[in-house]
Image (cartoon, rainbow, N blue to C red):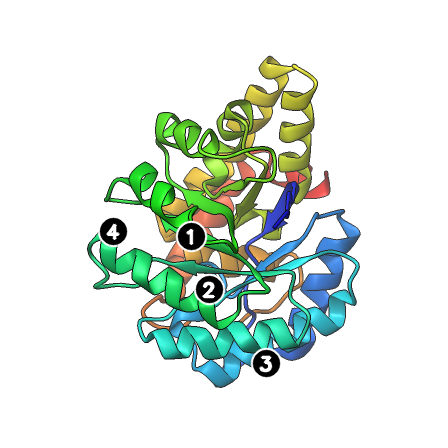
Amino acid sequence: MSNPYTGVWPALVTPNVPEGGLNESVLRELTEYLIGKGVSGFYVGGTTGEGIFMPATDRKRLVEIVLEQVAERVPILVHVGAIAAGDAIDLARHARDHGAAGISSIIPPLYESIDIITRYFETLASAVPDVSLYSYLLNPSLDAVALMERLKQIPSINGTKYTGSNMFELQQIIELSDDDWTIFSGMDEQCAYAAMMGATGCVGSTLNFMPGVYKAIRNNVEQGNYVKAQELQVSANHVTAAMSKVGFQGALYEILGILGFECASPRLPRIPLTEALRTQLREMLNATDFRALVDM
């Protein structure tokens, strides 16, 4: 099964309303804005999108809205991971039935061995064998290469979203399969280096507001302009560092608010920034190339 997706994919933020629940109008606006920025696709309901913190009804509605708004202009990968395999299957079938290009799943909490994790992905894949499936390796603490050696035996597994900083490990995963193997890098601050290693594309949080810089990074890597790619990566990383200092997810919601997308507060267990942290974030952003990167 071939699915060689490339380019830059926002790990789409899920805008909320103050009283809780989806802000459907802002979700549509943000999706449209990012399509206008030339993104290659969307990763929906992942860690950034807070899918694992949402009830299934919200997760399904989120997928429906994004697919409807995108209207097949770019592909959509839907994160369906859940502790209960039955919930993941239900979400996977919903995503398939509504036209998602593929599905993805984290390694659920408490799934602690390669044998158990493999059984989880086999169960999920067997329920929707006609849909491309991507594992989501989030800061893997186990042997990610050994795991992917096992998972690649599942017919519908097409690759992974690797959110880790170990470029040697990423390289080994990339080399496990042929040109149809789709590998997304998942750490924005490693985009250039993952591209140099051969990552097919990148999925990331800060792509919600500055996807253009990551397009430029990948384009420069492809053209062999590694010094320029490094300069752009460092510039983007200054913004990421400012966000991390005050609380990354709260900062992400605050930045989208600055750009006119009112997303309210993150969902528990994440919390919004205090007023003091908002002020601190804005001061730190003013010391970076934030505006220029947003405008790219």
- The percent coordinates of residue 250 (x first, y second) are 43, 60
- The percent coordinates of residue 91 (x first, y second) are 50, 76
Viewed as shown, does residue 282 lie left or right of 148? Answer: right
Residue located at (32% from left, 41% from top) = 144
Residue located at (72% from left, 42% from top) = 295
Judge whether 173 appears above or below 157 on screen. above
Residue at mark 2 to residue at mark 4: CA–CA distance: 16 Å
Closer to the eye: label 3 or 1: 1
State the image quarter where residue 108 is shown.
bottom left
- The percent coordinates of residue 109 (x first, y second) are 26, 63
Tag 3 and tag 2, C-beta contact below 8 Å: no
Residue located at (33% from left, 64% from top) = 120
Q: Which of 176 and 287 is in front in this view?
A: 176
Residue at mark 4 to residue at mark 3: CA–CA distance: 32 Å
Residue labelled with disc 3: 61
Which element carries disc 1, helix, strand or loop?
strand
Closer to the eye: label 4 or 3: 4
Residue labelled with disc 2: 125
Closer to the eye: label 3 or 2: 2
Residue labelled with disc 4: 114
Judge whether 279 appears above or below 212 on screen. below
Q: Which amino acid does label 1 sit on?
A: Tyr
Q: Which amino acid does label 2 sit on?
A: Ala
Judge whether 279 appears above or below 220 on screen. below
Residue labelled with disc 1: 136
Tag 4 and tag 3, C-beta contact below 8 Å: no
Tag 3 and tag 1, C-beta contact below 8 Å: no
| Count of numbered badges drawn on the protein | 4
Q: Which of 211 and 101 is in front in this view?
A: 101
Q: What residue type is labelled 3?
A: Arg
Q: Residues within 10 Å of mark 2 (few under 14, many from 20)?
A: many
Tag 2 and tag 4, C-beta contact below 8 Å: no
